[in-house]
């Protein structure tokens, strides 16, 4: 056990990009949306929250989560656990700190965070009602073109040679900036999508330059990502994107025949050689890619190999469960088998983390860093534009009527009322909600929280060792 004097609480963070629009990724500006720390005083008695989820991570660290709050799960070191456990019955922070003999200032600041994280609550039951977390950024999905050089089995985009004009792209950026200012947000995230957006690389560059200038004029943070199938990734493309700070999310469904089956070239043929070439090129040039796979019945068995490659490369991988969009139920994986394969991936991830590799892959629509009552931000802080000035609250609704679309809070779905993990799940995509994966979620969410927590614990341990190693070398 590490001998740590200062109590530490570290909220889980996440890294990755998804093919899905959700925009719930790191939705909140602050890790802790709760305002309850405003009430914190050293003299006001606190109690440990009831129903806390707790998982021992070894090495003195413990994962804690309050499933009825919108705060992310956190990892606590042994001193922090000792302090939290002093509140089994009502006691003032001042008294608890005295009892544990821990340093006053650091302990008081930790206890304030523990209240924000929902681990401790006022003993008089005066907890404030929690507001859902505010998004940090407005996310703009730009479907630059409906044209594509692949013909994926599950694609919902109507493949046709129709692209956005530069004027339409710039007007979408203007609209998004006006909207985010109206909402008091400080950041714009643009997802360049398609079809295949690299078929319109000049258009992408023109919109990027415009967005960059507008963001600078308006003093906004700008984040951009290209969602690509990788077939057109060349040295010049990668160099431009890297130089401009535009992230790249590459879709890949496996390292064997499953890639060609699910993501064949538009004219027929296997896309795997092109995608592997793109990965090799990116690796050799020092570009870090975000990988994203759609989990179906056809590629499930090959996912451990893909997860292994991603961890070897040190690249984030998002594993997005397939949901039928207007057909294709044959691609739905059997939930029982899905759990078994993901448990196998879990074992592999633990082994690789122990070897200093990472990060751990992301589990479908679960965003541990931003629990929320909403499944996504569609129509709230997430909007899609397509060719012809088409506009929708979600890319899946481009070209369709979206007047009745409104993501409803998970607490309004009777199926979810008693679900322990409802704020980490959000209730599932409102367009494709069918609860096919609920059992798998319930079995896999605790495992994935543990993996993410272990990954963070390893990072902290390595970061602490580095100065000691440098000192020894000096
Ligand atoms: S796992 Fe299922 S029951 Fe639980 S919140 Fe999600 S959709 Fe609802
Ligand atoms: S409706 Fe579904 S696909 Fe669209 S943003 Fe929400 S969760 Fe994502």
Image (tube, grey):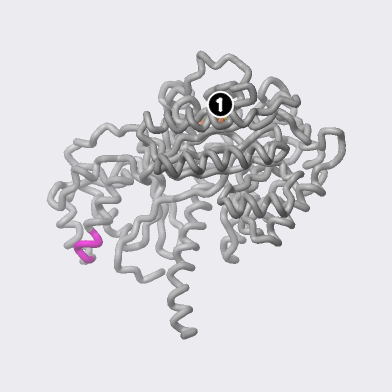
Ligand 2 near label 1 (Cβ, under 8 Å)?
Answer: yes
Can you tell which quarter of the image residue 37 is in?
top left
Residue drawn where x is 70% and y is 46% of the image: 303
Q: Is residue 209 above or below residue 316?
A: above
Q: Give the range drawn in magenta.
A: 103-107
Q: In this view, does 228 lie to the left or right of 424?
A: right
Q: In which quarter of the image is the N terminus?
A: bottom left
Give the image location of residue 117, x and y in percent: 33, 46
**Along the viewing direction, whichever of 51 and 248 lies nearer the viewer:** 248
* Residue designated by label 1: 394
Residue drawn where x is 26% and y is 40% of the image: 35
Give the image location of residue 4, x and y in percent: 34, 68
- Magenta stretch holds residue 67: no
Can you tell which quarter of the image residue 2 is in?
bottom left
Label 1: few (<14), some (14–19) or many (≥20) C-alpha neighbours in 10 Å = many
Q: Is residue 431 left or right of residue 81?
A: right
Question: Is residue 285 at least partly visible in the picture?
Answer: yes
Question: Is residue 375 at least partly visible in the picture?
Answer: no
Give the image location of residue 152, x and y in percent: 75, 33
Q: In this view, does 356 lie above or below 416?
A: below
Residue drawn where x is 29% and y is 59% of the image: 82
Residue drawn where x is 44% and y is 52% of the image: 55
Q: Is residue 353 above or below residue 131?
A: below
- Magenta stretch holds residue 105: yes
Can you tell which quarter of the image residue 389 is in?
top right
Q: Is the magenta stretch mostly helix, strand or loop?
A: helix
């Amino acid at each position: 056990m590490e001998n740590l004097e200062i109590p530490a609480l570290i909220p889980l963070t996440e890294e990755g990009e998804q093919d899905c629009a959700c925009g719930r990724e790191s939705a909140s500006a602050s890790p802790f949306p709760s305002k309850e720390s405003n009430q914190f005083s050293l003299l006001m008695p606190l109690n440990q929250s009831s129903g806390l989820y707790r998982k021992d991570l070894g090495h003195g660290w413990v994962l804690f989560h309050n499933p009825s709050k919108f705060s992310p799960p956190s990892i606590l070191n042994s001193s922090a656990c000792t302090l939290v456990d002093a509140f089994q019955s009502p006691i003032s922070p001042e008294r608890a700190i005295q009892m544990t003999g821990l340093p006053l200032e650091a302990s008081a600041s930790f206890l304030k965070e523990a209240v924000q994280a929902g681990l401790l609550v006022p003993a008089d039951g005066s907890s404030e009602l929690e507001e859902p977390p505010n998004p940090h950024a407005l996310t703009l999905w730009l479907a630059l073109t409906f044209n594509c050089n692949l013909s994926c089995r599950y694609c919902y985009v109507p493949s046709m040679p129709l692209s956005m004009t530069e004027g339409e792209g710039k007007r979408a950026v203007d609209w998004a900036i006006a909207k985010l200012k109206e909402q008091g947000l400080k950041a714009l995230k643009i997802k360049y999508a398609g079809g295949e957006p690299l078929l319109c690389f000049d258009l992408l560059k023109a919109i990027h330059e415009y967005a960059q200038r507008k963001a600078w004029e308006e003093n906004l943070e700008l984040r951009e990502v290209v969602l690509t199938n990788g077939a057109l990734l060349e040295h010049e493309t990668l160099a431009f994107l890297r130089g401009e700070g535009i992230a790249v999310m590459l879709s890949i469904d496996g390292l064997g025949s499953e890639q060609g089956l699910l993501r064949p070239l538009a004219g027929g043929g296997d896309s795997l050689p092109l995608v592997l070439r793109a990965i090799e090129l990116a690796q050799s040039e020092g570009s870090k890619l975000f990988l994203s796979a759609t989990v179906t019945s056809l590629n499930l068995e090959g996912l451990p190999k893909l997860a292994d490659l991603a961890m070897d490369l040190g690249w984030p991988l998002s594993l997005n469960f397939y949901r039928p969009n207007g057909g294709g139920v044959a691609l739905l994986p059997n939930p029982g088998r899905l759990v078994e394969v993901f448990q196998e991936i879990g074992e592999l991830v633990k082994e690789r983390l122990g070897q200093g590799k990472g990060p751990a892959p992301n589990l479908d629509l679960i965003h541990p860093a931003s629990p929320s009552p909403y499944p996504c931000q569609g129509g709230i802080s997430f909007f899609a534009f397509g060719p012809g000035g088409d506009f929708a609250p979600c890319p899946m609704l481009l070209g369709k009527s979206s007047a009745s679309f409104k993501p409803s809070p998970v607490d309004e779905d009777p199926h979810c009322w008693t679900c322990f993990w409802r704020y980490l799940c959000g209730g599932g995509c409102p367009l494709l909600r069918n609860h096919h994966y609920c059992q798998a979620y319930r079995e896999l969410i605790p495992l994935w929280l543990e993996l993410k927590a272990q990954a963070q614990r390893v990072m902290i341990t390595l970061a602490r060792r580095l100065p000691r190693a440098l000192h020894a070398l000096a």
